[in-house]
Amino acid sequence: MTDLFVLGHGFERLGEPGGLLTGLGRLTGLYGALALVVQLVLVARLPWLETRLGMDRLTAWHRWTGFWVLWLVLAHLVFVTLGYAAQDGSRLLDELDTLVFDTEDVGLATIAAVLLVVVGVSSARGARRRLRYESWHAVHLLVYLTVVLGFFHQVSVGEDFTGSPVGRLYWWTLYGCALGAVAATRIGLPVLRNLRHRLRVVSVVRESPDVVTIWIGGRHLHRLPARAGQFFLWRFGHRWWEAHPFSLSAMPDGRLLRITVKALGDGSAWLQYVGPGTRVFAEGPYGAFTGARATRRAVLLVAGGVGVTPIRALLEEFAHVHADIVVVYRASRPEDVVLAGELRAIARWCHARLHFVVGPRGTPGLPGLSALVPDASRRDVYVCGPPGMTEAVRQTLRRLGVPDDQVHTERFAFAA
């Protein structure tokens, strides 16, 4: 980025009135644009990247990169306004008014900055807890509009475009590759797969008053590269605009896919009443929470609440390869235990040890884990549950001497 700044004659103007501030504004704008492109690559969910790094790590990078984008863009706005105000000898608010309303395409950049603030605020932990997933997802689609508006701003007034052929080639290539990756993996591939498989709801089984299992069929499902532990973004029937991230709750068998859904919000509550024959559009599979990450025959599967769904699928897959399996299932109340009968049946078949830990949350995590699984340090550990529980279990495992590279986690949001 600094090289592009030099090619755009940035250093030549540092001695002018307001030159240092304007230069800082250009640099923060360049780095903000780069961070925004990185954001695009992270949300593209490139299969080769996701399988190597895992969804949790990519999500964490996406979150922190997003905040860097926001602060760099805001810094760009502040420094450029201060620099031009010093250069023109005008008041700050007058200069801001001139930039936003009288300068070509700066108004578009201002709209992009406002949209970034909206997305950033919705990503704060407090706001995220209060928003439905569907609402949060819709707000985050604004990022794509932000990219387009920001690119138009760079093309029209960015000196690294207008004054440097190398800069133009660099940014066109960068944006083109990033947007191409998004188009291919988030639009092209899902459309092709859904045209091939023609997914529909086959049957709906009620597991409890607020939990249903949905069986989904289609054509040539043996060609779908899905594994136990992975998730899809599911869209059902006439509410196709709502994307629901649910993990598979059974190992794919090439004939049917299965998810188990608890009514945790408006969207998942509606799915309690979806009927057989409903068309399904699925985007995925996503996630590296699979048996492919195991490095040893002995495994420990830890579930919290409805986070049991990918754990149940993994139990089935590990059972087929005759792994040494221990399952620990944490729930607050007996009625919160989901798929208990299936877990017991699979455990009996493969001689797995199955522990239900039921009681008020109180102490987060599983303080009695060392007694339940004294040999945890020799096992690969898979953990899926609410974020607080997942982090507490990870800390407990560290105290038990389990290396971090043996611990694989999945976020609760993809299980419920």
Image (tube, helix red, strand yellow):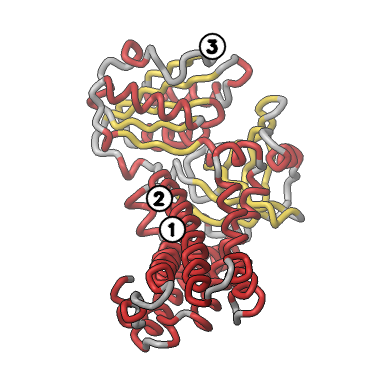
* Cα distance in 3D space between marks 1 and 2: 8 Å
Residue at numbered disc 2: 61
**Label 3's element?**
loop
**Dot 2: few (<14), some (14–19), or many (≥20) neighbours within 10 Å?**
some
Q: Nearer the viewer, mark 1 or mark 3?
A: 1
Taking depth in this image into account, of 286 and 320 the one nearest to the observer is: 286
* Cα distance in 3D space between marks 2 and 3: 34 Å
Residue at numbered disc 1: 42
Q: Position of residue 138 (x, y in %)?
A: 65, 55
**Dot 1: few (<14), some (14–19), or many (≥20) neighbours within 10 Å?**
many
Instruction: Say which quadrant the C terminus sits in.
Output: top right
Q: Is residue 174 visible?
A: yes
Say above or below: 129 vs 78: above
The type of residue carrying mark 2 is Trp
Say above or below: 324 vs 253: above
Taking depth in this image into account, of 234 and 398 the one nearest to the observer is: 398
Q: Is residue 44 visible?
A: no
Q: Position of residue 273 (x, y in %)?
A: 76, 39
Q: Position of residue 356 (x, y in %)?
A: 48, 16
* Cα distance in 3D space between marks 1 and 3: 38 Å
Q: Residue at x 43, y 80 (%)?
A: 172
Q: Residue at x 63, y 18 (%)?
A: 335
Q: Is residue 307 left or right of residue 65?
A: right
Q: Residue at x 58, y 55 (%)?
A: 117
Q: Position of residue 146 (x, y in %)?
A: 57, 66
**Label 1's element?**
helix
The type of residue carrying mark 3 is Gly
